[in-house]
Amino acid sequence: MDRLQILQATASVLLLLSFFSSLPGAESIGVNYGMIGNNLPTPAEVVSLYKSRNITELRLFNPNTTVLAALENSGIGVVLGTLNQDLQSLAASPSFAARWVSANVVPFSKSVDFRYITAGNEVIPGESAPFVLPAIKNLGAALRDASLKIPVTTVVSTQVLNVSYPPSQGAFGSLSVMSPLVAFLEANNVPLLVNVYPYFAYAGDSENVRLDYSLFTANGVVVQDGPLGYTNLFDAIVDACYSALERAGGRGVEVVVSETGWPSGGGGAGATVENAKTYNNNLVAHLRRNGGTPKRPGRKMEAYLFAIFNENQKPAGTEQNFGLFRPDMTEVYHVNFTP
Ligand SMILES: *[C@@H]1O[C@H](CO)[C@@H](O)[C@H](O)[C@H]1NC(C)=O
Ligand SMILES: *[C@@H]1O[C@H](CO)[C@@H](O)[C@H](O)[C@H]1NC(C)=O
Ligand SMILES: *[C@@H]1O[C@H](CO)[C@@H](O)[C@H](O)[C@H]1NC(C)=O
């Protein structure tokens, strides 16, 4: 090679490298910041904890300006939820939605990296379900009026599925709510946020649901679904959601996993530190591999572990034991977030 060829080769390698590093294909992994405890560290300490552990995204269930102030200029991506009890007002009143945006988003819009605003957490099916889409639309209009481009969506549990097995047969119930919602998400290129808990599937039927399949430790395919083979339950649940989205006319809608986790104690089947550590570390490794799911191979995935702390004011039992950290900020077990 002469010098010119070397320069050209170097340039194309650099071009290739910058192409790969700017691909939208990189996964993102965050952690839910639940606050249902009376012994939790201050928001400033929590933000320092996220940064020191290289946790780059955070989900906040309710708007809280003390927490948002602590997140300013942190570089942490933030998913911000509305209170479920505000949904009816957000749906009924464009001016209520505008006030919500002025109070909770506008003051932080230049210093906090908002990834999504979520209208409602796990309200479909339920009596607040009809408020979700009108609330999304009013919040979206208020954000546009404030010249902000932040996607607005909702968080659902897998209760929205009335069929989840096999994954290819995934289908929503509540179609009168889900069909227009899915059409809106499809038209606006906004993801659906879904809370995905292999743990509850395992704990609810530990005779029939294999622990290794739930913990990403099975050696091969456990569920064969037509041409697609599943080695872990997480992918099977996510793909049931993709099948349901396709049936509801949302072939292009992406699933973001807004919660997933495993309890380290509290008495439920399989609720041990060892299993929680195995689940969460294997989940992170699975996401980092960027392999997607059998139905969406190679698709980048975005997921938020539940949760940063054990929360002592949640219902007794496993619910209080989903934390990666104790309230004194010591680890319950180690999860490595550094890519
Ligand atoms: C966070 O990332 C930095 C830079 O990559 C690295 O030096 C550090 O060890 C990481 N911290 C942890 C807790 O993994
Ligand atoms: C916001 O968070 C702070 C710090 O945890 C807490 O003291 C306060 O009560 C919260 N405010 C609301 C409105 O939830
Ligand atoms: C699921 O919901 C659809 C639409 O509401 C309905 O047609 C179907 O019978 C339901 N299937 C099951 C198994 O409940």
Image: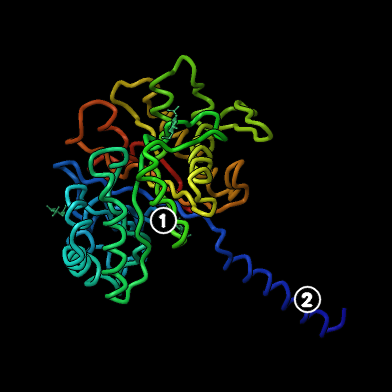
Residue at 58% x, 27% y is 218
Disc 1, ligand 1: is the CB inside 8 Å? yes
- Which residue is more in the foreground, 205 or 327? 205
Q: Nearer the viewer, residue 248 or 98?
A: 248
Q: Is residue 182 above or below residue 95?
A: above
Residue 337 screen position, x and y as percent: 45, 50
| The residue carrying mark 2 has its beta carbon less than 8 Å from ligand 1 | no
User: Can residue 8 be seen?
Assistant: yes
Amino acid tagged 2: Ala
Identify the amino acid type marked 1: Asn
Closer to us: 109 or 186: 186
Q: Eyeballing the image, is 295 above or below 279?
A: below
| Residue density around tag 2, few if under 14, some if 14–19, many if 20 or more, within 10 Å | few
- Left or right: residue 195 versus residue 282 is left
Q: Position of residue 199 (x, y in %)?
A: 41, 29
Q: Disc 2 and disc 1: Cα gap in Å?
A: 34 Å
Q: Quadrant of ligand 3?
A: top left
Drawn side of residue 204 relative to residue 224, left or right: left
Q: Which mark is residue 139?
A: none
**Which label sits on residue 54?**
1
Q: Pinpoint residue 67: horizontal percent, then vertical percent.
A: 21, 59
The residue at 42%/38% (across/down) is 196
What's the residue at 47%, 51% (across, down)? Answer: 302
- Where is residue 83? Give x, y as percent: 20, 50
On screen, residue 212 above or below 103: above
Residue at the outermost front position: 176
Q: Which residue is mark 2?
A: 9
**Disc 2 + disc 1, Cβ < 8 Å:** no
Q: Residue furthest bottom?
A: 4
Q: Earlier in the sequence, mark 2 or mark 1?
A: 2
Label 1 crowd (10 A; few <14 / some 14-19 / many >=20): some
What SS does tag 2 mark? helix
